[in-house]
Amino acid sequence: MIDAIALALANLTSPAVLFFALGIFAGIVRSDLTIPQAIAKGLALYLMLAIGFKGGAAVAEVGLSTDLALAALAGVVLSFSLPLVAFALLRAFTKVDRATAAASAAHYGSISVVTFVAGSEFLTLSGLVWSGHMVAVLAIMETPAILTGLWLAGRASKGPDPEARPELVREVLLNGSVVLLIGAFLIGWASGPAGMARLDLFVNGLFQGLLCLFLLDMGLVAARRLGGARKLGLSGVIFGLVMPLIGAAAALPVAWLIGMSPGDAAALMILSGSASYIAVPAAMRIALPEADPSVYLTLSLAITFPFNLTIGIPLYASVAQAVLGG
Amino acid sequence: MTRPIRKKVIAVVETAHLRRLIDLIKSCGVSGLTVIDGREGSGVTGDWVRDGVSEAVEMKIVHAVMTAETAERVFDKAAVFFERYPGIIYSHDVEVVRGERF
């Protein structure tokens, strides 16, 4: 218990979280602080490249095992099934229409790369070892939830236009974040420890500082979206806080079942507890234009992301450590 | 000096639907257009701003110059398009040089 509190405090006083809080503060008080869009986009690309490369290089070092296949299978199952829970809760406790509930639910089955980046960094700093192949699981979990979301929307939607289908398939399978993550993972894997030695300064040395700068921007973005919370109502806000806990809790028995280490289990919990705000919104805008993006973007960006960054990540790490640690 | 009059059609559309709108405009016989980024604004569904995170819901502005007959065809198709997808389309007369290009 004391360890868990110490972990939570260490997280809350980490530079990354404090810079995120600074961004939120600056956004709320309407400071003119902004991160130029091109820099923010560059930082997002850097984080995906670094996490992908590090994951691939780690796999090259320890080699492939059945653990990767099992972890990938667990990720796929969670990504497919979590939207069902999210959809049921949204329909039961909030006033959002079916299409918006389905689109929002898809966000909660999918993952947030930045939450994983921050979470994996937290795990590393806390001494919880996680496997590089969890990066592949991260990429794999982006997509299944989108399919569940579309199925849930059912007759509430006319479905994507026939001309939009190729675009939807391209967006789902080849969106920039998936291509960069998988690509960097494969490059890290192919170049192995020698490649890592060359890029060490870039993907490790600069990582914390650039993560802080990116999270400062995320704070500004989240603050801009906070106004949407009024539209969600109290039940919507509660959903945004409870759903990540449900997602993470669902991942724990799955992780136990396949014999994951505490570090990998914590990583899977972070993935399951996070909500997408890049890949899924893009797919949902194409496939379900009638769903209200202000609902799902407010939920994932302004409520769930800050919750996970501040409370969720250390909580998941503590629970994984306590349950599977020994 | 009298210059040829053409229609300038302007559409504001979400990035997620931009490609299909461009295809729609081109399918009406328009040969040239320009797309620029929208910075921020507001509409019937609320405020929007270009934040660089969720690009799909950011807005793009499409400019195209064409004859009045072509603009009519674009508007007929766009009326169906914008029934489902968020955005607006409007036009006004403009003077051009080298009118044969439009």
Image (spheres, coloured by chain):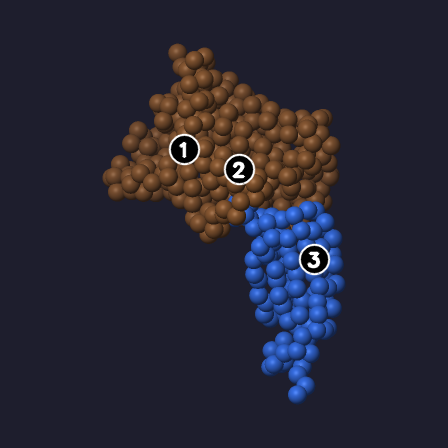
Chain colours: A brown, B blue
Mark 2 or mark 1: name the one nearer the start of the chain: 1
The residue at 70%/73% (across/down) is B93
Left or right: where A47 falls relative to A153: left
Q: Which residue is mark 1?
A: A15
Regarding mark 1 in the picture, which secondary structure is present there?
helix
Question: Quick check: can you spot residue B70?
Answer: no
Left or right: where A273 falls relative to B6: left
Q: Which mark is residue B88?
A: 3
Q: Position of residue A136 (x, y in %)?
A: 43, 34
Regarding mark 3 in the picture, which secondary structure is present there?
strand
Q: Which of the chains bears the disc numbered 2?
A: A
Q: Residues within 10 Å of mark 3 (few under 14, many from 20)?
A: some
Question: Quick check: can you spot residue B6?
Answer: yes
Q: Given this view, does label 2 or label 3 mark the residue nearer the observer?
A: 2
Q: Amino acid at mark 2?
A: Phe
The residue at 52%/48% (across/down) is A32
Do discs 2 and 3 belong to a common subunit?
no
Determine the CA span between mark 1 and mark 3. Answer: 43 Å
The residue at 49%/34% (across/down) is A21
Of B39 and A120, the residue lying toward us:
B39
Q: Amino acid at mark 3?
A: Ile
Q: Which of the chains bears the disc numbered 1?
A: A
* As drawn, A257 above or below B82: above
Q: Which residue is mark 2?
A: A25
